[in-house]
């Protein structure tokens, strides 16, 4: 498990991008819960944000891809609107320990192997 950041580094109802071990990731904090995803749209494989740390729509209710406007549910990563409807963002297994968000990057490797 690798340290991503402290939970207080992400304001509630906000998102933050990270580079960790050569991977682009982002985390969203909503109602005190944290969700971590690989920063890659399932449509074209592009990164999602339109500005640094801006992964959410204007209402802060959904994750939004800046390239084609796809919308994803924060809690599951499921696309509910846009060109990749029904597909999902790649989740990153994580835990919070002593206030730190720790991520397991091997969970991404397993997801990528399962998709072949």
Image: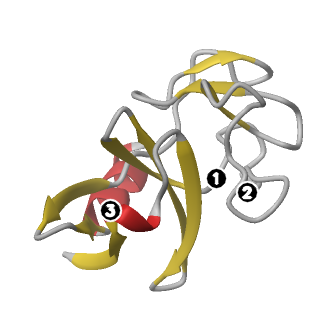
The residue that label 1 is drawn on is 40
Distance (Cα) linking label 3 and label 1: 22 Å
Question: Between disc 2 and disc 1, whose residue precedes?
Answer: 1
Please tell me which residue is depicted at 76% across the width and 39% down the height of the picture.
65
The residue that label 3 is drawn on is 7
Distance (Cα) linking label 2 and label 1: 5 Å
Q: Of helix, strand and loop, which one carries label 3? A: helix
| Image quarter in which the N terminus is found | bottom left
Picture coordinates of residue 59 (x, y %)? Answer: 71, 25
Q: Nearer the viewer, residue 106 or 113?
A: 106
Please tell me which residue is depicted at 64% across the width and 31% down the height of the picture.
60
Q: Are marks 2 and 1 in contact (CB under 8 Å)?
A: yes
30 up-or-down from 61: above or below: below
Q: Nearer the viewer, residue 7 or 4?
A: 7
Picture coordinates of residue 116 (x, y %)? Answer: 45, 46
Q: Nearer the viewer, residue 6 or 103?
A: 6
Count residues near mark 1 (Cα–Cα under 10 Å), then give few for <14, some for 14-19, many for 20+.
some
Figure quadrant of residue 86: top right
């Amino acid at each position: 498990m690798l340290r991503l950041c402290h939970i207080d580094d992400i304001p509630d109802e906000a998102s933050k991008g990270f580079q960790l071990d050569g991977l682009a990731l982002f985390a969203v904090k909503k109602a005190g819960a944290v969700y971590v995803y690989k920063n890659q749209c399932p449509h074209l494989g592009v990164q999602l944000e339109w500005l640094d740390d801006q992964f959410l729509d204007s209402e802060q209710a959904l994750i939004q891809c800046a390239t084609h406007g796809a919308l994803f549910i924060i809690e599951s990563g499921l696309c509910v609107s846009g060109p990749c409807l029904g597909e999902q963002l790649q989740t990153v297994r994580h835990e919070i320990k002593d206030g730190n968000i720790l991520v397991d990057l091997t969970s991404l490797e397993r997801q990528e192997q399962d998709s072949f």
